Every structure is written in structure tokens, then in C-alpha cells.
Image (cartoon, coloured by chain):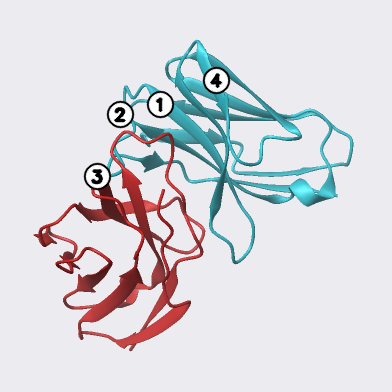
Chain colours: A cyan, B red
Amino acid sequence: DADVTQTPRNRITKTGKRIMLECSQTKGHDRMYWYRQDPGLGLRLIYYSFDVKDINKGEISDGYSVSRQAQAKFSLSLESAIPNQTALYFCATSDSGQGYGYTFGSGTRLTVV
Amino acid sequence: DAKTTQPPSMDCAEGRAANLPCNHSTISGNEYVYWYRQIHSQGPQYIIHGLKNNETNEMASLIITEDRKSSTLILPHATLRDTAVYYCIVSVGGANNLFFGTGTRLTVIP
């Protein structure tokens, strides 16, 4: 099994719908992240969490919310999806934020129509 | 975190060394240089990192200039599976997150 598992792998949803992307990890890492990647661009940070009680906004948090249900689970929600949220979403974990220790999931490709 | 500058794309012949440059002229003394790569649309994968000294592991070598303003990632014998986008990142250890720029798209040619 993968260390960082994202579900679903692909999702098509309609404008205005609420959608949740889920991430679970078996690394035992404290820190979890949600990134977004648009075609031809690098990854941009949406939200990050250092532990269950610590949630922080990243550079592009508008339109998104997150929930850290447990150390191993970190969910990303789009309350009312819009077409420009069509992107590839990655969950990542790290142990105390050391830059060499990031482990990424396989990504969720989200299309909002 | 310091910004980095990388060429948008490079080609390399299969079996030859791939040398990927990165400029980070504003790097601070406590910032590390990290390299990740992203194959197709998979999640990025850690390759190597360094602070001052050159580093080598089973995947690659990292050469950091003495003034630390630039570095080079070396894949000694590139294979087709090394075709990917390579990200050079500078960051302090324990930073809130890693800033991924647009990277260098390396294409290994048969």
C-alpha cells in the first residue's frame, strides 16, 4: 500500500457542487499539506497542518477548507466548486518539515464543469 | 525562502550525464538546497539535498558552488525513465512548506 493515499484519483463535478478530497498516510508524520498544480506550473500550497489541532492557510486557500480528522487523515473540501478549481491536487506529508522528507500522494485530478 | 532560477527545459542523450543548473543568488546561510522531480503527473519525489558540501546518493550528485549562489544536479547516466520535471528548492530546515517553481523539464532522448 502507498504511504500517502489520495481518493478519488479522478473526479468530474459540476459547478456549485460540494466536493471532498481525502488523504490518508501511514508514514506517521505530523505534518500534512494540500497542494494544487495547474498545467505547466509548479505546485502551490493550499493548506497545511502541523498536527490535529493546527491548521494553517497557504498561498491560495480561498475557496477551500480542510479538516484534520486524525494524525493520519487530512481532507480538502471545495464548498462550491468553480471551473477554475480544475487542477491536479496533491497531498503530502513530512516529519517536522525537513525539506528532504516530503512524501507525496499520487494526486487527484479534479475537473469542474 | 530564497527564489531559484532554472532553465525551462533541457535535453540529454540516453546514457550521458544530465547536468541541471539552478541559480539561487539570494540564498541565506541556513537555507538548504533541495531537489525533487515529478515524473509525468505523479507526485514529486525527493532526490537529494545539501547545505554547503557536495552530496551524492544512489540517484544523483549535487554540486554547490563555494559561494552557494548556484548548484548543479547531476544524473550520471540518464535513462528514459529520468524524463521528468526537476525542481530546485531552497528552504530552511523545518520551514512551513516547500516552494515549487516551474522547474526544468528534462527530456532524455534515445
Cβ atoms at labels 3 and 4 below 8 Å apart: no
Q: Secondary structure at mark 2?
A: loop
In the picture as drawn, the residue positioned furthest to the right comes out as: A16
Residue at disc 3, secondary structure: loop
Instruction: Identify the disc placed on residue A31.
Output: 1
Q: CA distance from mark 2 to mark 1?
A: 6 Å
The residue type indicated by label 2 comes to: Asp
Q: Residues within 10 Å of mark 1 (few under 14, many from 20)?
A: many
Q: Report the disc number at residue A55.
A: 4
Horizontal and vertical percent for residue B29? Answer: 23, 49
Q: For marks 2 and 4, give the CA distance.
A: 16 Å
Kindly report which numbered mark, 3 or 2, lies closer to the viewer in this rendering: 3
Residue on which disc 3 sits: B30
- What kind of element bears circle 4? strand
Q: Residue type at mark 4? A: Ile
Q: Is the C-beta separation of discs 3 and 2 under 8 Å? A: no
- Tell me: residue B20, above or below residue A68: below
- Residue B71, image x, y percentages: 25, 68
**Rendered position, A11 above or below B80:** above
Q: Amino acid at mark 1?
A: Arg
Are callouts 3 and 4 both on one chain? Answer: no
